[in-house]
Image: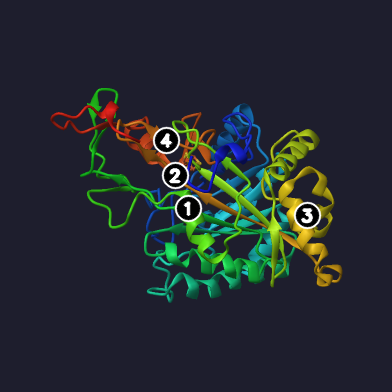
């Protein structure tokens, strides 16, 4: 258990390998940026559309999902991106583009919406080396975030999410991004913070497939000695946000495969206006949202439609079921402005990728929402490079140290 966050009091998101909210599709390996912390090599190579269709067949066969994240590489470099969105939507999934936005304009946004797009997740942070945005802070990047949020809002009916990799020197700016998201709670639906991770080559572990020790140096996420801390965890991000918003209260989580009380995906949903957050969903509300969606649609919810997120006031009627909503409603009824103003819901997700414990165990996200396809099977997209290089995931073993048995060390 982490101080201030008890996983037993949160809702364990019901996502599993065969039944999940999303899956991750990579139609291209090409990208027009080189972000720090990216998991994928940048190769000028697109998959033919029929090959991508076969990957969708694999999802259809093995995994019940609500949304498909179309990623890469940069998916807007993919020449058939509009057709692909249409193809995903035709199979009854919500297509969501995970893009850096560089190639996006309003006309393309409209075309994508017409093809069935459900929304965008824009990756925008200060370590992407974007032309004209070099050496700018996360706070300054909020102007760029707003540019995309307003473009998506003008087109309308699309979900708008932003993700940002968190490094030790940008952790302090997370509260600024959270505050910015509140200022634009009417058009920004989700903020995602992803803790930076890298495979460290000159660290405590050797890497193996079978009995063979691997040379990992060519992998996009391998560094002899990384420039950044690789141990920022979701609770560190929560602690940082609480310095500004002491009430900040996650409601649901996804555990690690090795550590039940690790927060690999940590969800917070708040209700408020641009001026004031009245409160947060509690665990029961998160459970209701996922369970009712599964009962009604046969799958777990991904990317709620903006018109649902605008109904913050109606959500307050669910107060008998959820302590978080009760607290929120109690605050809201004391404020007469709520009678004339719309209340919005907005989610903040914190993702903590692989942790490696002292004995070499790898703590992955249980059920892995971002699973992708490799040779007809489902694999963790954050470590696809290992499959491409070695045909399998690398296992980790502690480097031998005299007098110490790894099993005796703490996680
Ligand atoms: S295991 Fe890797 S790919 Fe899967 S959700 Fe976690 S970080 Fe993403």
* Mark 3 neighbour class, 10 Å CA radius: few under 14, some 14 to 19, many 20 or more: few
Can I make out residue 103 in this image? no
The residue pinned by badge 3 equals 308
Please state the horizontal and vertical placement of residue 139, each as a whole percent of the image.
49, 73
C-beta proximity under 8 Å, tags 3 and 2: no
C-beta proximity under 8 Å, tags 3 and 1: no
Q: Quadrant of residue 292?
A: top right
Q: Earlier in the sequence, mark 4 or mark 2?
A: 2
Say whether mark 2 is within 8 Å of ligand 1.
yes
Quick check: 305 above or below 288?
below
In-image side of 43 versus 243 (left or right) = left
The residue pinned by badge 2 equals 353
Say whether mark 1 is within 8 Å of ligand 1.
yes
* Mark 4 neighbour class, 10 Å CA radius: few under 14, some 14 to 19, many 20 or more: many
Say whether mark 3 is within 8 Å of ligand 1.
no
C-beta proximity under 8 Å, tags 4 and 2: no
Which of discs 4 and 3 lies nearer the camera? The answer is 4
């Amino acid at each position: 258990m982490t101080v201030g966050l008890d996983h037993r009091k949160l809702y364990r998101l019901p996502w599993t390998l065969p039944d999940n909210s999303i899956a991750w599709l990579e139609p291209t390996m090409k990208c027009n940026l080189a972000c720090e912390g990216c998991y994928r090599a940048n190769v000028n190579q697109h998959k033919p559309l029929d090959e991508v269709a076969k990957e969708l067949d694999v999802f259809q066969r093995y995994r019940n999902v609500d949304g498909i994240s179309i990623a890469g590489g940069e998916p807007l470099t993919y020449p058939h991106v509009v057709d692909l969105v249409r193809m995903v939507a035709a199979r009854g999934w919500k297509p969501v583009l995970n893009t850096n936005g560089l190639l996006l304009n309003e006309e393309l946004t409209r075309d994508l919406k017409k093809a069935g797009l459900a929304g965008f997740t824009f990756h925008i942070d200060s370590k992407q080396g974007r032309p004209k945005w070099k050496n700018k802070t996360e706070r300054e990047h909020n102007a760029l975030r707003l540019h995309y949020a307003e473009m998506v809002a003008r087109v309308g009916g699309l979900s708008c999410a932003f993700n940002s990799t968190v490094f030790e020197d940008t952790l302090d700016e997370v509260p600024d991004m959270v505050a910015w998201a509140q200022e634009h709670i009417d058009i920004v639906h989700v903020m995602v913070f992803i803790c930076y991770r890298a495979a460290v080559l000159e660290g405590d572990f050797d890497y193996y497939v079978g009995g063979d020790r691997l040379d990992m140096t060519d992998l996009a996420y391998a560094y002899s000695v990384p420039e950044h801390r690789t141990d920022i965890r979701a609770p560190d991000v929560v602690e940082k946000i609480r310095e500004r918003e002491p009430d900040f209260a996650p409601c649901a989580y996804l555990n690690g495969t090795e550590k039940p009380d690790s927060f690999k995906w940590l969800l917070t949903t708040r209700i408020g206006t641009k001026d004031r957050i009245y409160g947060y969903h509690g665990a029961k509300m998160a459970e209701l949202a996922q369970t009712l969606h599964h009962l009604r649609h046969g799958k777990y919810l991904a990317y709620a439609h903006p018109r649902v997120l605008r109904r913050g006031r109606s959500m307050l009627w669910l107060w008998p079921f959820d302590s978080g909503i009760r607290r929120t409603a109690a605050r809201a009824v004391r404020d007469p402005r709520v009678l004339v103003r719309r209340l919005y819901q907005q989610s903040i997700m914190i993702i903590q990728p692989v942790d490696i414990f002292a004995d070499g165990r790898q703590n992955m996200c249980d059920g892995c929402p971002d699973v992708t396809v490799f040779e007809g099977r489902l694999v963790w997209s954050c470590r696809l490079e290992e499959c491409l290089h070695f045909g399998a995931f690398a296992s980790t073993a502690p480097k031998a140290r005299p007098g110490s048995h790894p099993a005796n060390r703490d996680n």
